[in-house]
Image (spheres, rainbow, N blue to C red):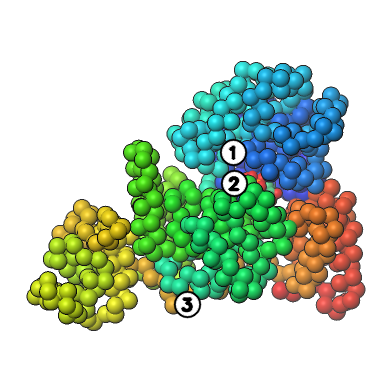
Amino acid sequence: MDLLPALSALFGYTAFRPYQQEIITSLCRGQDVFAVMPTGGGKSLCYQLPAHVLHGVCVVISPLISLMKDQVENARANGLSAAYFNSTSTQAERRQLHHDLQDNTLDLLYISPERLGSAAFVNYMKQVNIAFFAIDEAHCISQWGHDFRPDYLALSLLAEEFPQCPVAAFTATATQQVTSDIIDQLHLRSPLEVRASFNRPNLYYQIMPKRDVKKQVLYVLRQYADESGIIYCSTRKKVDEYAAWLAEQGIKVRAYHAGLSEEERSLAQEDFRHDVCQVIVATVAFGMGIDKPNVRYVLHADMPRSMEAYYQETGRAGRDGSPARCVLFFDAQDIAQLLRFAAAEEDETRRDAAKAQIYAMLDFVQTDCCRRKSLLAYFGEDYAEHNCGACDVCTGEVARDDATQSAHLALQLIQASGCRFGKMYIVDLLMGVSSDRIVENGHTELAGFGAGKHATRKFWLFLLSALLTQGMTAIHDPEYPTLSITAKGKLFMRSDDHFFILQAAEKQLQRKQITKKLENEVSSYNAELFEALRSRRHELALAEHVPAYMIASDAVLRAMAALLPRNRRQMLEINGMGEKKWEKYGEIFLGVIDKHCRALPERRGTQA
Ligand code: ADP
Ligand code: ZN
């Protein structure tokens, strides 16, 4: 079956993303599918397109009721016929749905997993002409995963109750263990298994030690004046504090955490989607189902608790494929706090798992190779390039210093003083400060006392924190944060190994430079026209109460501002401009382009 005409008519795209075509072909042939694809990889198209092409309805199982309305709206905007059925459906909606199912006019039906727990519903669905089932966020069925939902267990009956219907399971996170668990639980029958690359080439990764985090955050924000971004903090208190502070700086910001009411949270999310606010400051509670494609940056004001969390959270940037930036700020205190949280976990296995995740995160922030390479390595993927060109290590934003001698000196002093003191005391020893306490302890006599005078206190504090984060030292009791030396540290003291510290270079790259590194072809487009199109889109979005990106993405508008289409055919050649969008908005945008070209006849053509 030639799928390209449908791809272009419905979605306006000219080519499939990796694996989309294989998945769709399998579904059309009646084969089950299991697909792990990163956020933004284009999972929804994998079931939406066959839903339209095949007879019968595609039943999509989706975990969040709050999202279903959006998903339906989004599908309808592309010209698919879609509906949802959940506890919020009204009588009238249910009646309409019944008719549509009887008439076989629906492409997509979104339901929540608990529907399948009802025998009456299952029996009803047996009368319906179902093309296939699509399961979103399929990892929720696995107890090994991190988002287990008991509701999802009901899905294991699909294969038995609807033996003639193929099942397609999609997720963005699944280790090998979770993968085989999902396949077992769902009883998938020799499915097509797909594991797409987790590399997100349009994301720029940056990791920096905290200095003055608020200022560091603001510095990034200022480069993205009226664009969307997310700031993650570790606690509710911090979220409120940061949100208040940013508001004082004149930034349109909303807070989001589990301490707010359901209503406040959905309001914040709506404001974000509709570009009423520019920034969301949030805890990890802000997560699943943020499908806003034009998030230009994700900042971590604190260290995330695991690599999975980091990957997922940064993954919310740049779903539209345009350049986006991810910056993580961390310090030794973050690590101590995370370890404290982990230590409070009562179940031993889970406590160990949580600790292991924190250490993996630590390795990641301290490792001295390409961020992309080490991130992908964590997910079992080998990134072959030497220089990714889009992380702070590869672009030289980070300076890598050999601090082997200093590390030895500090460790010797920690050991000589009996591993009983905190970092301030050790810095005093290094700097040769004869404080009362040091004199009392007789530590002015230690070999190495005052041997660090050539450097600043700030340097030694940084070095001690690097020793801690690289696992050479440890703090066992956060109440009395005394530094002790780990087995790894002892091994290092006896070896010829080098110890490196990564330091943020004085000068950071500016947004423009980063964008340039991420964009393969430097696209030149008419900036004035782009702004005119954007403001027209904004008016349309307000009038229709839909998010601007649902009308057209920035990339689509930029393409218009570069190619200056003058008629339907040229308009449809733009990637992302489908039939339905043309019908609704084509003439309107043509009008803007026409007006622009007539006003400036001498400026025709493109300019950056
Ligand atoms: P996921 O659900 O995997 O996170 P989405 O289905 O939301 O990803 O898709 C992410 C973005 O990529 C959407 O804006 C979608 O329209 C776009 N997209 C999907 N498939 C293609 C394609 N073949 N060509 C261009 N853009 C695509
Ligand atoms: Zn790199």
In the displayed orientation, state which residue is furthest to the bottom.
Answer: 454
- Give residue 265's position: percent from left, percent from top: 64, 52
Q: Quadrant of the N terminus?
A: top right
Q: SS for tag 1? A: loop
Which circle, 2 or 1, is nearer the viewer? 2
Residue sitting at 87 percent across and 52 percent down? 584
The dot on residue 288 is 2
Residue that badge 3 annotates: 507
Q: SS for tag 2? A: loop
| 5 or 282, nearer to the observer | 282
Q: CA distance from mark 2 to mark 3?
A: 35 Å
Residue sitting at 71 percent across and 23 percent down? 121
Q: In which image quadrant can residue 500 be found?
A: bottom left
Q: Crowding at label 3, few (<14), some or many (≥20) Cα neighbours within 10 Å?
A: few
| 532 or 301, nearer to the observer | 301
Q: CA distance from mark 2 to mark 1?
A: 9 Å
- In this picture, is 507 found above or below 418? below
- Give residue 267's position: percent from left, percent from top: 69, 54
Say whether marks 2 and 1 touch (CB < 8 Å).
yes
**Beta carbon at label 2 within 8 Å of ligand 1:** no
Pick whichever of labels 1 and 3 is earlier in the sequence.
1
Instruction: Determine whether, in the image, residue 479 is placed left or right of residue 572.
Output: left
Q: In which image quadrant can residue 23 be found?
A: top right
**Beta carbon at label 1 within 8 Å of ligand 1:** no
- Give residue 90's position: percent from left, percent from top: 80, 35
Q: Crowding at label 1, few (<14), some or many (≥20) Cα neighbours within 10 Å?
A: many
Q: Quadrant of the C terminus?
A: bottom right
Pick whichever of labels 2 and 3 is earlier in the sequence.
2
Instruction: Determine whether, in the image, residue 249 is placed left or right of residue 122.
Output: left
- Give residue 248's position: percent from left, percent from top: 61, 73
Residue that badge 1 annotates: 137
